[in-house]
Image: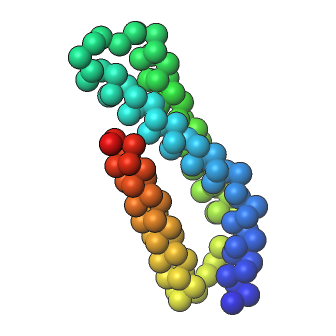
Amino acid sequence: MGKIIRHAKSELKQLPLILAKLLGSIMTVTGVSAVVFLETRTTPPARGGLLLFALLGISGIVVFILSSRVLAKRKADDASWSLDAKDNIRLSVLSWMLLLVFVALAIVVVLLSAR
């Protein structure tokens, strides 16, 4: 159990980069979704607004990739990332459960906002 606590402390130190990665993904989803939404409307959108959303999507991709690379570099340098198989499975299951919860919440929000 001590390894998991050390691993959690190590992840908390990396929280700013994880949040930057999350921000990049939100920027990308927002920008690309807005571009698709504006392009498929019956009235032609303003090109300035379309360009701003496209830039938001592109900058989100850049933020996501850069923070992902920095996180990978820190993981390679950090010695506390070595876990045994059982702890690694626990963390993997936890990560997948969190992902599924967030996806379900996003679907619920989209369904409720589309009414």
Q: Give the number of callouts.
A: 0
Image color mode: rainbow
Give the position of the C terminus as an image quadrant: top left
Residue 46 visible somewhere in the drawing: yes
Left or right: 39 in relation to 30? left
The residue depicted at 71 percent of the width and 51 percent of the height is 16
Q: Is residue 16 above or below residue 37?
A: below
User: Is residue 18 or residue 73 the one in the foreground?
Assistant: 18
Residue 80 in the image: state x and y as whole percent: 71, 75
The residue depicted at 70 percent of the width and 57 percent of the height is 15
Give the position of the N terminus as an image quadrant: bottom right
Residue 9 in the image: state x and y as whole percent: 75, 71
Question: What residue occupies the far front of the structure in this picture?
Answer: 115
Tell me which corner region of the image, top left, top right, bottom left or bottom right, holds residue 83: bottom right
Q: Is residue 14 above or below residue 9?
A: above
Residue 25 in the image: state x and y as whole percent: 50, 44
Left or right: 94 in relation to 33? right
Residue 31 in the image: state x and y as whole percent: 45, 30
The residue depicted at 51 percent of the width and 42 percent of the height is 26
Q: Is residue 109 above or below residue 86?
A: above
Q: Is residue 95 above or below residue 18?
A: below
The residue depicted at 38 percent of the width and 33 percent of the height is 33
Residue 103 visible somewhere in the drawing: no
Left or right: 58 in relation to 63? left
Tell me which corner region of the image, top left, top right, bottom left or bottom right, holds residue 5: bottom right
